[in-house]
Image (tube, rainbow, N blue to C red):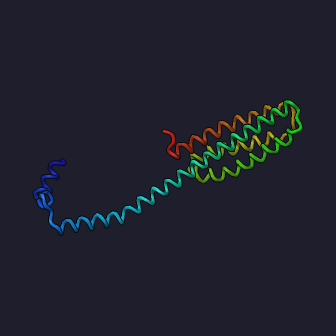
Amino acid sequence: MLNSAMGWLKARCPVLFDDKMPVWLTIVASLAAAGLTYYFAPMFTRQFQIEDVRSAHLKQTTDQLNSEIIELSQKVRRFDSALVNKSKEAASLREDCLDLITKLQWRLVDLKVILSSPSDEVFVTDVSNSLEKLRISLNATPTKSYREGVHAGMAQLAKATANVLNRLYSKASLQG
């Protein structure tokens, strides 16, 4: 196919294959190349910039979500330890946990914008429901099963967060 196209081109435009090209053809080719570069280069550059900003935002959102979930996990662990040891700081740690849950609930607003397809919304909703279940568990009156409820809420949140992170990594093309 390529040989037939080259043969056709040599038969129709032999000047393109001579050792010397005419000056007029060199000027026309240079002007065409400059015009095409002037027209297409900004389009490609703009698309790459959009992709860079999108990728940076996805990375920042993922990092912040990871950081806040880790911080919440640590606070819940300290709160659980304070409950076991009947420490006075348990109430303060519980409030810190509730504050972090509120912060994460606001983070979900950003996640809903990023993960906006119907299949992705399920994962964001799972995280939202898990956070709400954990918040309810933390606000419950302490009973014998209080700690178990908090542990179950954290386990559900961990699973839901893993699913959302998986979707974010897929969206950022960080996962195959």
Q: Position of residue 19 (x, y in %)?
A: 12, 57
Judge from the rendering whether residue 147 lies leftward or rightward of residue 21; answer left or right.
right
Count the labels in the image.
Answer: 0
- Above or below residue 41? Residue 128 is above
Residue 168 visible here: yes
State the residue at coordinates (81%, 40%).
Answer: 138
Judge from the rendering whether residue 109 lies leftward or rightward of residue 170; answer left or right.
right
- Above or below residue 11? Residue 72 is above
Q: Position of residue 89 (x, y in %)?
A: 86, 39
Q: Position of residue 55 (x, y in %)?
A: 53, 50
State the residue at coordinates (60%, 54%).
Answer: 113
- Above or below residue 50? Residue 169 is above
Residue 13 visible here: no
State the residue at coordinates (57%, 40%).
Answer: 166
Of residue 82 and residue 142, the one placed in the foreground of this image is 82
Q: Position of residue 99 (x, y in %)?
A: 77, 47
- Residue 63 lies in quadrant: top right
Of residue 147 and residue 31, the one placed in the foreground of this image is 31
Judge from the rendering whether residue 20 lies leftward or rightward of residue 166; answer left or right.
left
- Residue 96 lies in quadrant: top right
State the residue at coordinates (77%, 37%).
Answer: 76
Judge from the rendering whether residue 104 lies leftward or rightward of residue 93; answer left or right.
left
